Image: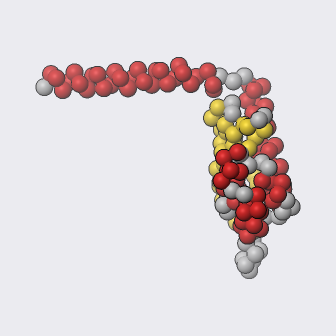
Amino acid sequence: MKAGKIMIQRVISSLFVLLVCQQVVFSGELELTPGEKRRIESGAIDTFETIISLCKRERFDEIYEYGDSISQELMSKEKFISGMKISCRLASSRETVRDIEVQIISPRRVRLKAIMGFAFPHDEWGETVFHTKLFEMILEKDEWRIHLSQILYCY
């Protein structure tokens, strides 16, 4: 019985040490000044709003340039554009995007949460349908980028 208690104490001690080490290692990344936080948030939001604006104007070739390097390697520009012509169903009104929130994961990675308005051409009432969506963005070459599949399949 005593050996079991010792084993449990060792496991708990090990978990505690791992948690403390994780805090020490990763705490430096999240200690940002208020100015740095505002810069990160506004940069990501500006890029996101630009992407949405381009989508509403059906400028899919320009949206492709906001894709991160991984998604551009996985998807050709032609495939992305043809997919967007089929799937882009954003509402054209001012209700396209609202209530954008940014969570800073690190100085080079953020998660945006936004309420998105979608229009479906076969909807007899022509109403905008709203869904809360999450998008992750990364900073590549000093520009905020998004994985293209998050845009292509966002509805």
Q: Position of residue 34 (x, y in %)?
A: 74, 25
Please determine whether, in this image, residue 119 is positioned above or below residue 50. below
Q: Is residue 131 visible?
A: yes
Q: Nearer the viewer, residue 103 or 80?
A: 80
Residue visible at 46% across and 21% down? 20
Q: Position of residue 134 (x, y in %)?
A: 64, 50
Q: Is residue 146 visible?
A: no
Residue visible at 68% across and 50% down? 73
Q: Quadrant of residue 102?
A: top right
Q: Position of residue 90 (x, y in %)?
A: 76, 63
Query: Total of numbered circles in the picture?
Result: 0
Please determine whether, in this image, residue 116 is positioned above or below residue 85. above
Please determine whether, in this image, residue 23 is positioned above or below residue 90. above
State which quarter of the image contains the C terminus. bottom right
State which quarter of the image contains the N terminus. top left
In this figure, which colouring scheme has been used for the structure? secondary structure
Q: Quadrant of residue 151?
A: bottom right
Q: Position of residue 12 (x, y in %)?
A: 32, 25
**Among all residues in the image, which is located at the extreme left?**
1
Residue visible at 77% across and 35% down? 141
Position of 40 with respect to 53 (left or right) is: left
Residue visible at 54% across and 21% down? 25
